[in-house]
Image (cartoon, rainbow, N blue to C red):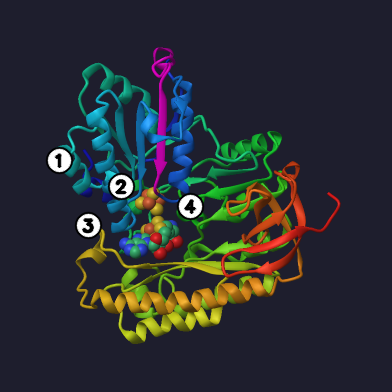
Amino acid sequence: MPNLLEAKKRTQIKPKTINYELEEKYKTLGKNKTYFIKTYGCQMNEHDTENIKAILEQMSFKETDIMENADLILLNTCAIRENAHNKVFGMIGRIKHLKESKPNIIVGVCGCMVQEEIIADEIKNKYKWLDIVFGTHNINELPKILANNLTNNKLELEVYSIEGDIIENMPVKRDSKYKAWVNIMYGCDKFCTYCIVPYTRGKQRSRTKENIIKEVEELKKQGYKEITLLGQNVNAYGKDLEVDYDMSDLLEETAKTGIERVRFVTSHPWDFTDKMIDVIAKYPNIMPYIHLPLQSGSNKILKLMGRRYTKEKYIDLYNKIKEKIPNCSVTTDIIVGFPGETEEDFNDTLDVVNTCKYDSAFTFIFSPREGTPAAKMKDDTPLEIKEQRLYKLNDLINKYAREANEKLKDKIIPVLLENISEKNEEMLMGYTDTMKLVNVKAPKEKLGQIVNVKIKDVKTWSMDGVIEDKS
Ligand code: SAH
Ligand code: SF4
Ligand code: F3S
């Protein structure tokens, strides 16, 4: 069972590296069976799903995208805000009905939500009909957990509140043939006062550069065009290793593999070094796009959040990025309605948005997470006021997002065509180097290529264009 006090601990003990290997006896466990998996969380959660899918397929399960047909249903959950919980519990309710008519299906819940003590308790007490529950630290144990459930026919709940290990050699079934996530670190040690992630994902553990670069080189060989180095706080990469090697070194070495596009998320402003900016500016295959969460523009609130930078420092960093990396797009995350946020504090946030004119942003109303310091802070702002602040902020964000797109009208920009467009089957969709969504009139043969696109039409959250070169 997960335990909040255990989850808070940070010791000096070095994480173990475990090499994943599927035991022979599990290889046919899923024969003639199908699985359905739904993912609720961030990129790390999505990438975990890619690992889970591959493990299940090694066990002979086949994927289905129709939940009602599946023999195994898994929900890979997120705990970041209350509404993430609500969505999952809504879905569990639907699945309960399904299980009543098909009692043999196996239903499982995994991911960050079940790492929370209160949720695990709730599952044990109210959702005993679930079959398997496992956390973020033991995805590698899925075969064993499934086998135990099949043998014992009762709820298998295996969630650990540990600082975590590093699991290498996990198989992966990637969603895309052209772009890939590459974990460079797990967990987070920042403990921003509102955030549940350090509790659900354990302590910061960086993978070795050798394993990371090997994975990137392999992906390049397989024809991947783009990789995204992944972590909750990638700029702190390597700080937990006994080597003199940091994120700027890793970015440089990744760029030198020659893979066409390198991205990275997420960048905490606190650890963003000048050396990193120089490396990003130097290598054309490191994309000019930085997600730089602000959270708040008020120094008082930033302090309460434990973010360890000020509004002024953030703006300095932003200016440096914009000066040194031409046409760099910058996006952000902002929380409104943090405990104690006054109208004046909120105006400070608007002020930073007016200065940084973000290309886009994710905005949220503060959601208290049980066990975090912010959940205990006095919060007397009514929800109605918080909602008004969110709308006001979103209007401003939308205005600048549109303005950023307008600047690209009639320009020619590189786009990696990665899929059929959702809005029109005749079109393909992809992202610019600066991470803007473009729908492109192009034949399907162009999928997987980076093409020059002339932007014809501009909206707030996407653009339309046509291929301009002969590639
Ligand atoms: N590691 C990233 C953030 C990951 S969580 C970083 O530090 O930037 C993604 C976003 O969710 C955060 O940037 C924050 O804006 C938001 N968030 C996290 N906890 C939240 C909470 N309790 N309430 C509302 N939003 C939250
Ligand atoms: Fe959460 Fe802060 Fe860690 Fe990001 S850096 S995951 S916001 S604790
Ligand atoms: Fe959610 Fe866990 Fe990611 S809480 S945002 S899935 S790290």
Look at the numbered discs 2 and 1 and tell me whether their residues touch, using CB distance below 8 Å: no
Q: Name the residue under label 3.
A: 370
**What amino acid type should be assigned to the residue bearing mark 1?**
Lys
- Front residue of 172/373: it is 172
**Which residue is found at the position 31% from the left and 57% from the top?**
83
- Give whichever of discs 1 and 4 has the lower sequence position: 1
Q: Is mark 4 on a helix, strand or loop?
A: loop
* Image depth: mark 1 or mark 4 in front: 1
Report how far apart the C-alphas of labels 2 and 3 lie in the structure. Answer: 17 Å
Range shown magenta: 24-40
Look at the numbered discs 1 and 4 and tell me whether their residues touch, using CB distance below 8 Å: no
- When asked about the image quadrant of residue 84, the answer is bottom left
* Image depth: mark 2 or mark 3 in front: 2
Q: Position of residue 405 (x, y in %)?
A: 64, 71
Q: Can residue 278 be seen in this view?
A: yes
Residue 304 is left or right of residue 215, and the answer is: left
248 vs 375: above or below: above
Q: Mark 1 points at which residue?
A: 126
- Give whichever of discs 4 and 2 has the lower sequence position: 2
Q: Mark 4 points at which residue?
A: 239
- Front residue of 57/248: it is 57
Q: Does the magenta stretch include residue 19?
A: no
